[in-house]
Image (tube, rainbow, N blue to C red):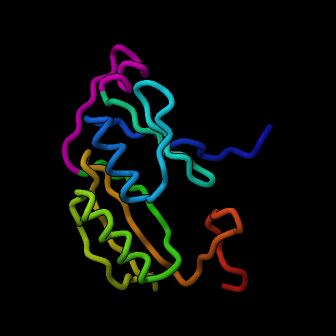
Amino acid sequence: MKIPRITVLTLGIADLKKATKFYEAVLGTPPNTSYDGVTFIELPGTWISLYPLEKLAEDISPDVQFIRSGFSGVTLAHNACSKDDVIAIIERARSAGARVVKEPQETNWGGFSGYFADPDAYYWEVAWGPMFDFTENGELRFKENA
């Protein structure tokens, strides 16, 4: 048995074409639209899947009723290599149509971060922290001796 890990985060979205264009602009990664009705964004370690919300609820169970109201208590995060990268990514998100919820700023945990909401109101934190770095293939890790 392999070590458990998150391999795909599926976001239920309202407009597949709009969401695909948004995430391509923000992440700068060409989306995989080879499969009808779904978009995959292949990132190191964990992919993002964009799938129409109604179809996602239907796939889970005919009894599932989706109710979205306010903040769900879940955020997605993108760790950046520097404070300047945090600012640049937030600005890319803003330019792509995101609502910036919290401008990039120093944090109480010693890092630097900001938040945006995508067109479907999923909240993303873009953060840099002095205790993190990345492996050669882009996976987040704690720095040695941090």
Q: Is residue 100 above or below residue 73?
A: below
Q: Position of residue 26 (x, y in %)?
A: 37, 59
Q: Is residue 52 magenta?
A: no
Q: Quadrant of residue 52?
A: top left
Furthest residue in direction top, as rendered: 62
What's the residue at 23%, 66% (across, down)?
100
Q: Quadrant of the C terminus?
A: bottom right
Compared with residue 31, is residue 14 higher up or lower down, i.e. above or below? Answer: above
Q: How many marks?
A: 0
Please report the bounds of the magenta region as a residue range. 54-70
Magenta span contains residue 68: yes
Vertical relation: 44 (above or below) 108: above
Q: Residue at x 44, y 61 (%)?
A: 77
Q: Where is residue 108 drawn, in percent x and y?
A: 39, 83
Q: Residue 121 versus residue 84: which sits nearer the camera?
A: 84
> Is 37 displayed left or right of 15 in the figure?
right
Taking depth in this image into account, of 118 and 19 the one nearest to the observer is: 19
Instruction: Answer above or below: position of 46 versus 106.
Output: above
Image quarter where the N terminus lies is top right
Residue 12 occupies quadrant: top left
Q: In the image, is 70 to the left or to the right of 2? A: left
Quadrant housing residue 11: top left
Q: Position of residue 73 (x, y in %)?
A: 33, 52
Query: Residue 5's x, y, as percent?
Result: 64, 47
Residue lying at 38% horizontally and 65% vertically, measured from the top left:
125
Residue shown at the point (50%, 45%) measured from the top left: 41
- Nearest the viewer among 18 and 121 is 18
